[in-house]
Image: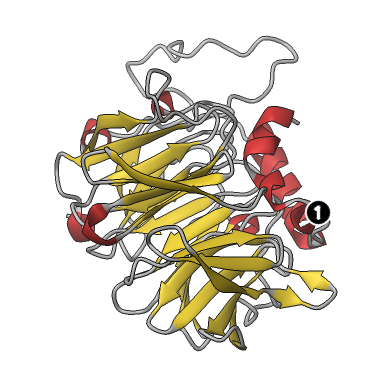
Amino acid sequence: MDLKNKEVTTTRLTEGIRKSWIPLAAVVGAFTGFVSAALRTPPAPAAGTSGTSRPPDSPGSPLPAVAATEPSVELKSRYKLTSVLCGDTSPHRFRRFLADIAVGPDDTLYSLGDDETRVFDAGGTLIRRWAVKPKAACLEVGPDERVYIGSLGRVDIYTSKGEYAGGIDVGEPKQPAAVSAIRIHENEILVADARARIIRRYDEAGKQIGVIGDKNKTGSFMLPNGWLDFDIDSSGVIQATDTGRHRVSGWLLNGEPIGAFGKFGMQDPADFVGCCNPVNLAVTPDGNIVTAEKMVARVKVFSFDGTLIAYIGPENFDPKCRNIHLEVDSRGRIIAADPMQRVIKFFSPAIAPSNGQ
């Protein structure tokens, strides 16, 4: 295991994630998927081709961590990298770690790293910063610009100016939540608990009022990687990563499942590779779903029904990424935080991929 990568991502949740119980079904499913892929007989070359465009792997070499089918030029051209924030030459670069990002009103960008929150305007100019508690794992910004910082068993709340405004305890008395994502919906605080493998609903006073993700065969999400991410679209539908099942699942606020898409595969670029993907997720203003994967560090955009409509390839990210934290602003730009390179990249839509068209 890459200890540096572990430090900047999942171990930000400390003991809560490391002690997460991994369902046996997830382990068996992942192992079966790898074996199936490794033993799959490659298709015969099409007539008129030599079948030698890809050299055979050397003896003992690992299975290549790439999709066998290259995405189309159209899929790869729908977004283009337009700017990078907090790079090596920036006076505001992150020196130790970059944990998460969030978009606030007027497309202000909030970042969490080096034990502080930094706020940038839509043009990338730093406008404020303040210290937060060590080992914070994620953040969110509400419509009123209040900032929510998640750590083990806790969500702390700050004003837009960085003044502490209280917080809530998350999880059970003897099982503090491993908080990996936070979203604000109307008067509710929704918190991903990667330890219990559910999304918890809280009112503003910190009272738990519901659970999302427990109405399936296992009674929870399947998270072999110990990470849970989600977002909420404009209609109030929750889209969540179900990494052990290699899918994105949709939920109503009352906890009722409404469908899912995705499957394990190494041939189709739309499929999810590895033991547990997709890891991170965001929803665009027009309802498309953006996902990020590890093993092959890439970002993809799907329509609501699961059709792949855009692809941002691994050449844009550090190959050791276990998380690529995602946000989408009002202009439709995909904002991706690479915690290994400790930079924030902006991908602007070159061809609007709306509703799979």
Q: Position of residue 50 (x, y in %)?
A: 40, 11
| Residue 205 in sight from this viewpoint | yes
Q: Amino acid at mark 1?
A: Glu
Q: Residue at position x 77%, y 58% from top?
A: 16
Q: Which residue is mark 1?
A: 15
Left/right placement of residue 270 relative to residue 167 reads left
- Furthest-left residue in this view: 351
Q: Position of residue 301 (x, y in %)?
A: 33, 50
Q: Is residue 187 above or below residue 75?
A: below
Q: Is residue 229 above or below residue 10?
A: below
Q: Residue at position x 27%, y 38% from top?
A: 124
- Quadrant containing the N terminus is top right
Q: How many marks?
A: 1
Left/right placement of residue 250 relative to residue 60 reads left
Q: Secondary structure at mark 1?
A: helix
Q: Residue at position x 63%, y 49% from top?
A: 276
Q: Residues within 10 Å of mark 1 (few under 14, many from 20)?
A: few
Q: Nearer the viewer, residue 33 or 191?
A: 191
Q: Position of residue 292 (x, y in %)?
A: 46, 45
Q: Nearer the viewer, residue 84 or 118?
A: 118
Give the image quarter of residue 89. top left
Q: Nearer the viewer, residue 162 or 105?
A: 162
Q: Is residue 34 above or below residue 244?
A: above
| Residue 75 in sight from this viewpoint | no
Q: Position of residue 47 (x, y in %)?
A: 35, 21
- Quadrant containing the C terminus is bottom left
Q: Residue at position x 70%, y 54% from top?
A: 226
